[in-house]
Amino acid sequence: MTSERERLEADLQEAERELQELEEQLYDRPEFGLGEGGADAHSWEMALARKERVIAHVDALREALTKAREGTYGRCERCGAQIDPERLEILPATALCVDCARAVDTSVTPPLGSRA
Ligand SMILES: [Zn+2]
């Protein structure tokens, strides 16, 4: 079995690489012409929005790695319950069990089939 730490480190590396790519993409800011923003401006804005999500993901993965080192990885930060391993498989950086995640963030889309 691959250790959680190895998996988290691999995910973190991937996220950091993606962040790097997005930063390069964002460096070439297109001209925002009046009324004709066009595809370039649109994809630039998409990259900017994506970058924010990737940064949040990198932060979450770093936090999860810290927990893995401390031996507290996989425990819900809110209620202390063990997080479902299947959930960790899908969302390795999550700090909350599915119930707490739903309770604190109603914007989270529940996985297929788990809708109440
Ligand atoms: Zn919980």
Image (tube, helix red, strand yellow):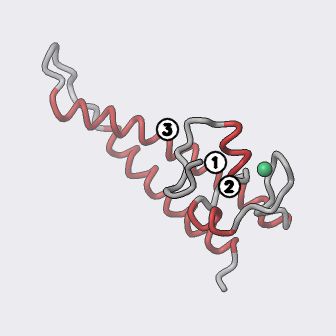
Q: Quadrant of the N terminus?
A: bottom right
| Side (left or right) of 43 relative to 53 | left
Residue that appears at 59% across and 48% down: 116
Secondary structure at badge 1 equals helix
Looking at mark 1, is its residue's CB closer than 8 Å to ligand 1?
no
Residue 59 - label? 1
- Residue shown at 38%/52% (left/top)? 21
- Identify which amino acid the numbered label 3 is placed on: Glu
For image coordinates 33% across by 37% down, the residue present is 46
For the residues labelled 3 and 2, the Cα–Cα distance comes to: 16 Å
Residue 18 is situated, as x and y percent measured from the top left of the image, at: 43, 55
Q: Which residue is mark 3?
A: 52
Are the residues at dot 2 and dot 1 in contact (C-beta closer than 8 Å)?
A: yes
Residue identifier under label 2? 62
Task: Residue 48 in the image: state x and y as whole percent.
Answer: 39, 35
Contact check, label 3 and label 2, Cβ < 8 Å: no
Above or below, 92 against 41 in this view is below
Asked if residue 7 lies left or right of residue 20, the reply is: right
| Three-letter code, disc 1 | Asp
Q: Position of residue 88 (x, y in %)?
A: 65, 64
- Of 78 and 31, nearer the camera is 78
Q: Amino acid at mark 2?
A: Arg
Q: Nearer the viewer, residue 113 or 48?
A: 113
Name the secondary structure under disc 2.
helix
